[in-house]
Image (cartoon, rainbow, N blue to C red):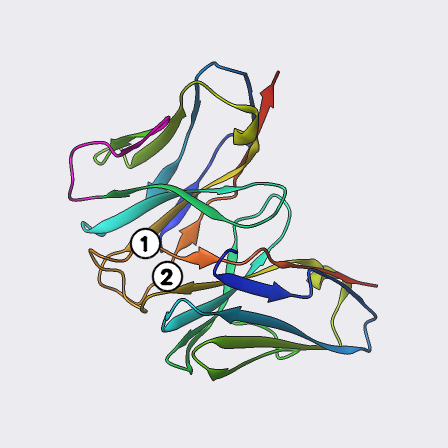
């Protein structure tokens, strides 16, 4: 069974600084997707960034980037120039490509941004 | 507008009540999902529907009964719940059931915060 582990229940960062959220996963598949979702107080899950396992290049979306280490099964999220609006719960998720098996989530990391 | 709308936003119900959660999407998606989100736990997939057919039921107690009358609407009927069922219930949709190169994951609603008293 696939599992996703987020070992940091809570993190904090000073505004304008950089923070890295950790995620590891366990799978025997070779083709899959990894996602980071953000859940602000509004509760809606918003897709932040995604990574295809077959791509070696790390995904980047503006201030958000990932460090994807396939051999180590590690998928960390780096937030640069942190803003107050980045405060939220962040979930790492995994999905096998081309399969009906659905998104598997980690338990989340609560990020606080300090002014 | 999120694309996936859930009502009600909050619900308090007694253990003997019957209530329903509603989810609606107009994104043209063919797959819809119910997730349960409890504090400090990973999201738990409850039900999966594809083209109005239930394709997955993850050992969910029968006091939760899903219904998908068409590809745009999904319901979760609740009856004789327990206090441990209190949680945030999230609905999501995706273009199709299978992940592929064009599928950018799910679109989620804002959830229904359920409290069972």
- Kind of element beneath mark 2: loop
Image quadrant assignment for residue B5? bottom right
Mark 1 and mark 2 lie on one chain; the one further toward the N terminus is 1
Residue sitting nearer the eye, A84 or B106: A84
The magenta stretch spans which residues? A53-64
Which residue is labeled 1 in the image? A95
> Residue at the spot x=61%, y=72% of the render?
B22
Q: Please report contact status of discs 1 and 2: CB closer than 8 Å, yes or no.
A: yes
Image quadrant assignment for residue B76? bottom right
Counting every numbered tag in the picture gives 2
Residue sitting nearer the eye, A88 or A22: A88
* For residue A53, side relative to residue B62 (left or right): left
- Would residue B13 be counted in the magenta stretch? no
Badge 1 crowding class, 10 Å Cα cut-off, few under 14, some 14 to 19, many 20 or more, is: many
Q: Is residue A27 above or below residue B92?
A: above
Q: Position of residue A85 (x, y in %)?
A: 55, 30
Image quadrant assignment for residue A54? top left
* For residue A89, side relative to residue B83 (left or right): left
- Residue A99 appears anywhere in the view: yes
> Residue at the spot x=56%, y=70% of the render?
B23
Alpha carbon of mark 1 to alpha carbon of mark 2: how far?
6 Å
User: Which chain does the residue under circle 1 lie in?
Assistant: A
* For residue B18, side relative to residue B65 (left or right): right
Which residue is labeled 2 in the image? A102
């Amino acid at each position: 069974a696939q599992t996703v582990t987020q070992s940091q229940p809570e993190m904090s960062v000073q505004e304008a600084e950089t923070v890295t959220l950790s995620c590891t996963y366990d799978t025997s598949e070779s083709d899959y997707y990894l996602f980071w979702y953000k859940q602000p107080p509004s509760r809606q899950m918003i897709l932040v960034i995604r990574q295809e396992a077959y791509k070696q290049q790390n995904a980047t979306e503006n201030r958000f980037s990932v460090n994807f280490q396939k051999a180590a099964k590690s998928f960390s999220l780096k937030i640069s120039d942190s803003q107050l609006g980045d405060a939220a719960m962040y979930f790492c998720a995994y999905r096998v490509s081309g399969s009906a098996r659905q998104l598997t989530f980690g338990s989340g990391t609560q990020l606080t941004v300090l002014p | 507008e999120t694309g996936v709308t859930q009502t009600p936003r909050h619900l308090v119900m007694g253990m003997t009540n019957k209530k329903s959660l509603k989810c609606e999407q107009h994104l043209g998606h063919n797959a819809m999902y119910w997730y349960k989100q409890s504090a400090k736990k990973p999201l738990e997939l409850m039900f999966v529907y594809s083209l109005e057919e239930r394709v997955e039921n993850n050992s969910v107690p029968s006091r939760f009964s899903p219904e998908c009358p068409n590809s745009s609407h999904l319901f979760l009927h609740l009856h004789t719940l327990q206090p441990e069922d209190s949680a945030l219930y999230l609905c999501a949709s995706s273009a199709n059931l299978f992940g592929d190169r064009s599928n950018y994951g799910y679109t989620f609603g804002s959830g229904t915060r359920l409290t069972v008293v």
